[in-house]
Amino acid sequence: GQQVMQIPQYQHVQEGEDFTTYCNSSTTLSNIQWYKQRPGGHPVFLIQLVKSGEVKKQKRLTFQFGEAKKNSSLHITATQTTDVGTYFCAGHNFNKFYFGSGTKLNVKP
Amino acid sequence: EAQVTQNPRYLITVTGKKLTVTCSQNMNHEYMSWYRQDPGLGLRQIYYSMNVEVTDKGDVPEGYKVSRKEKRNFPLILESPSPNQTSLYFCASRGTGIQPQHFGDGTRLSIL
């Protein structure tokens, strides 16, 4: 079946360092969404990407959707302790969602 | 306040004892979905519903049932729970088109 792989599984950074997580789908996606889950919380929507090659920015966060609509990335510039949490990508096809396994980000002050 | 409400938040039960986890949303969303979250596996979709009386299987539907008799409610039913269904469950809803999903606070189920 369809799969979305996400790496790395964990990332520990010093506050102020950059962070990137990557997602790869086994098939072409209709669109991709990104979510953040704080410890003990529920996933919270960050953004969605629809077009091939699309790049969107939210303050220190940059999201990219690959040209083939099979891969995506989230880059955080100059991490802060408030960025701590697990980041998930979710590929969307034919009314189904396929979540990556998530990247758990820890930021040391 | 727009929200997705799940109950119960926590449940410890025994193998074979039927249980239902309720999910309700107040946003008039057509699409609702159930996920289970397990360490290292992310969220896996169990069932989803496009509208009232329209449901379909996700990636891991075995051992679960759902119903969508009203637009706002989408209960998850475990007819004969087993220990491998111990997990954290999330309900989510979204509007039509390419819309974000809104998640409930989660239900932690332990099947002994």
Image (cartoon, rainbow, N blue to C red):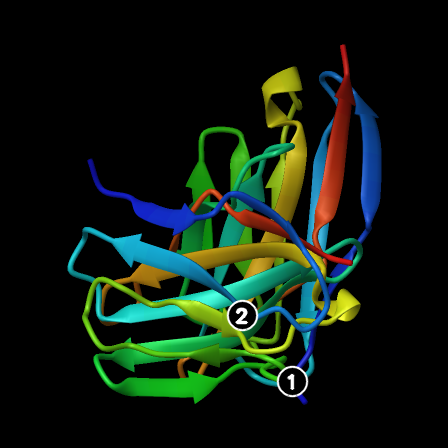
**Residue B112 position (above or below residue A61):** below
- Judging by the rendered image, the residue that carries numbered circle 2 is A91
Q: Position of residue B10 (x, y in %)?
A: 57, 44
| Residue A58 falls in image quadrant | top left
Taking depth in this image into account, of A61 and B105 the one nearest to the observer is B105
Q: Which residue is mark 1?
A: A2
What is the C-alpha distance between the residues marked 2 and 1? Answer: 10 Å
Left/right placement of residue A80 relative to residue A60 reads: right
In the rendered view, does A18 fall on the left or right side of B89? right
Of the image marks 2 and 1, the number of the one nearer the N terminus? 1
Q: Look at label 1 and name its amino acid.
A: Gln
Quadrant hosting residue B13: bottom right
The crowd level at tag 1 (other Cα within 10 Å; few <14, some 14-19, many 20+) is few
Disc 2 + disc 1, Cβ < 8 Å: yes
Residue at image x 66%, y 22%?
A: A78
Q: Is residue A70 left or right of residue A21?
A: left
Asked which secondary structure carries label 1, the reply is: loop
- Tell me what residue is drawn at x 48 percent, y 80 percent: B65
Q: Hey, which residue is sitting farthest left in the picture?
A: B28
How far across and how far down the image is residue A10, in percent? 83, 42
* Closer to us: A35 or A13: A35
Which quadrant is home to the C terminus of chain A?
Answer: top right
